[in-house]
């Protein structure tokens, strides 16, 4: 059955729950405008085996037991430093919980002597790490490989099989908070570059940048936000050839001989909505029939009864994913091919969601999660303020103002019933512009003749529209895809890199101006099975070794490329 293997997508963890940043307030172009290729047929660029630089192959360097054990030591040193990002961290000099970041920097300096010897290190906003080595040809735009130093907190150490900061290695897995997200990338990147720079005869033709933020799990403003500004100052908008950060979907093997890999070429939008309901309180012995909490409960019910629709858009990454499946796994996807031919996007959507489960659904559907409710202070007093927080991840067929306006519409009958006045997103310009552009009958009528019983204040926060789509054709993609095909090649099989959409957000939010070629992909076949953000996070070390080898090959291939 077509797409059956998509169920592999189930269990992939969103990379980071709460990251987002406004993208210069500017509206992003609608999906597809930037880089959609009509008649995309999933041609694969050639496999790109690094050659011509006289270096040993990644395979020969990184597949031995000795190499693995050396890498275990490095990764242990990094994972043992508890660089936790807490949402309520204070300033650098006043909050001791920043101290581990200094320790991590010392650890990196000891672990990667060639990197520290040969690369220029800029510390951006105290803890941001930007390593640069100039290429000999300044006409080539740099490549920028990213990761983040911070990890999410551990809720309860006693629930872990091995203590979260022991970095215990059981012969197969290395266990610990951050062993996967995202120190897996951090260690692998530094190790690949350490290997290159340990060779005194090798120096890059193309400038190479490694940069590591330190608050990705908290918002990324202090780390990636400042690193983005630093790199923009240095290289300018569109000054970088390729940006690669964490992310992507788990690999998918179809029919035992076709391996699909999914770098994310796009992130969904994000908005948090806060609703504060202000009502009259009073003594609980003589209550109103509905307190503010009761009214808010109705509001929640109204929101949850309106979910968004999934939609595979023509020429979107997901559509192109289906094109690739139809082309390279025809036996497993006869129905996909048929629906593509008929241009039946509706049925394609149904098929994708039915077979791909929750992860697939939310790649193409705006999600809504009621996450925070606060109200009531005293058991004998009716609440005067009740607050609600709702998290949305906005699919490209929707927009943030549309989501905001839908809330106003969905709660309108409750607002009417209780004679509430509504202050909807006051001062939020995109919202106001959106409403001004609606036909009159679609605006929610203001009511002036009512004796208001309370006020509902709506506010949007942490907004970012879905990102532009990074290209899946052209010279930069070809080097990237060619390297993936080389690095993940297997006997008798075919490797198909496919751009996809990502549900979560990454630090790349802060880097979008630097390059149109932004890819979010942790080059691991294990991804999705590593307990990211929960107990017993771990990484398979053989999979980690593949990552080291991939980064090693990627730098070499981009060094040889003229793009
Ligand atoms: C690298 O190149 C830039 C721009 O050409 C130059 O300003 C900088 O000093 C160089 N850095 C090193 C370490 O050579
Ligand atoms: C709402 O206002 C109308 C008109 O002023 C009034 O008739 C009605 O009783 C009010 N309803 C509530 C729940 O206060
Ligand atoms: Zn991460």
Image (spheres, rainbow, N blue to C red):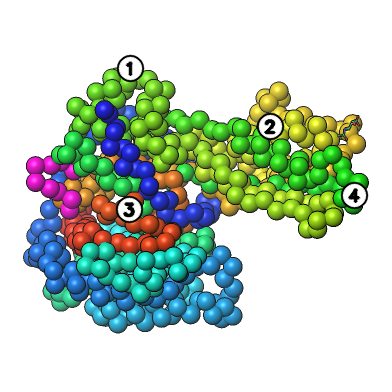
- The mark found on residue 342 in the picture is 1
User: What residue is shown with label 2?
Assistant: 409
Count residues near mark 1 (Cα–Cα under 10 Å), then give few for <14, some for 14-19, many for 20+: few
Compute the Cα span from label 4 to label 1. 65 Å
The tag earlier along the polypeptide, 1 or 3, is 1
Would you say 422 lies left or right of 167 here? Answer: right
* First in residue order: circle 2 vs circle 1: 1
Q: Is residue 516 left or right of residue 87?
A: left
* Residue 296 in sight: yes
- Magenta region: 487-495
Give residue 285's mark.
4
Q: Residue at x 37, y 48 (%)?
A: 12
Q: What residue is drawn where x is 65% and y is 31%?
A: 437
Residue 376 image-quadrant placement: bottom right
Label 4 or label 1, whichever comes before in sequence order: 4
Confirm whether the magenta stretch covers residue 490.
Answer: yes
Q: CA distance from mark 2 to mark 1?
A: 36 Å
Q: Indicate whether 14 appears above or below 123.
A: above
Contact? badges 2 and 1 (CB < 8 Å): no
| Residue 181 % position (x, y) | 38, 61
Q: Secondary structure at mark 2?
A: helix
């Amino acid at each position: 059955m077509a797409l059956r293997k998509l169920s592999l997508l189930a269990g992939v963890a969103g990379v980071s729950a709460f990251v987002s940043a406004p993208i210069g307030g500017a509206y992003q172009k609608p999906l597809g405008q930037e880089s959609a290729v009509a008649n995309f047929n999933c041609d694969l660029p050639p496999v790109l085996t690094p050659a011509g630089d006289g270096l040993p192959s990644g395979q020969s360097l990184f597949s031995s037991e000795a190499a693995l054990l050396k890498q275990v030591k490095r990764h242990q040193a990094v994972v043992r430093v508890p660089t936790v990002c807490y949402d309520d961290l204070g300033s650098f000099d006043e909050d001791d919980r920043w101290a581990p970041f200094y320790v991590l920097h010392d650890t990196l300096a000891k672990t990667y002597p060639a990197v520290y010897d040969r690369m220029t290190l800029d510390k951006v906003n105290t803890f941001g790490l930007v390593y640069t080595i100039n290429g000999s040809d300044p006409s080539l735009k740099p490549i920028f490989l990213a990761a983040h130093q911070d990890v999410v907190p551990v809720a309860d150490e006693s629930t872990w099989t091995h203590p979260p900061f022991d970095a215990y290695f059981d012969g197969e897995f290395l266990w610990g908070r951050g062993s996967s997200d995202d120190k897996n990338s951090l260690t692998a990147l530094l190790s690949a570059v350490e290997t290159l720079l340990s060779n005194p005869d090798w120096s890059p033709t193309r400038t190479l940048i490694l940069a590591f933020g330190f608050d990705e799990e908290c918002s990324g403003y202090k780390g990636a936000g400042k690193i983005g500004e630093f790199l923009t100052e240095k290289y300018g908008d569109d000054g970088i050839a390729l940006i690669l950060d964490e992310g992507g979907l788990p690999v998918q093997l179809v029919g035992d001989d076709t391996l699909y890999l999914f770098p994310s070429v796009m992130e969904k939008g994000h908005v948090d909505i806060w609703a504060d309901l202000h009502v009259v309180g009073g003594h609980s012995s003589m209550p109103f029939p509905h307190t503010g909490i009761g009214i808010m409960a109705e509001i929640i019910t109204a929101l949850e009864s309106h979910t968004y629709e999934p939609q595979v858009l023509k020429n979107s990454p997901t559509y192109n994913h289906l094109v690739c499946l139809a082309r390279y796994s025809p036996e497993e996807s006869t129905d996909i091919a048929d629906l593509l031919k008929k241009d039946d996007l509706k049925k394609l959507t149904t098929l994708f969601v039915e077979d791909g489960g929750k992860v697939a659904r939310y790649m193409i559907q705006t999600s809504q999660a009621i996450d925070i409710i606060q109200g009531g202070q005293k058991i004998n007093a009716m609440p005067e303020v009740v607050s609600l927080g709702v998290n949305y991840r906005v699919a490209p067929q929707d927009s943030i103002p549309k989501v905001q306006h839908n809330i106003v519409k969905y709660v309108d009958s409750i607002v009417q019933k209780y004679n509430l006045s509504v202050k909807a997103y006051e001062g939020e310009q995109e919202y106001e512009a959106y409403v001004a552009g609606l036909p009159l009958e679609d605006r929610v009528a203001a009511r002036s003749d009512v004796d208001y019983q309370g006020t509902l204040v709506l506010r949007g926060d942490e907004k970012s529209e879905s990102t532009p789509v990074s290209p899946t054709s052209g010279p930069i993609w070809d080097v990237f895809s060619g390297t993936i095909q080389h690095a993940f090649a297997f006997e008798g099989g075919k490797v198909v890199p496919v751009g996809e959409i990502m549900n979560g957000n990454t630090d790349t939010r802060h880097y979008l101006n630097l390059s149109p070629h932004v890819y979010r992909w942790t080059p691991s076949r294990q991804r999705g099975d590593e307990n990211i953000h929960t107990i017993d996070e771990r990484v398979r070390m053989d999979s980690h070794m593949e990552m080291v080898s991939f980064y090693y090959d990627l730098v070499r291939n981009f060094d040889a490329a003229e793009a």
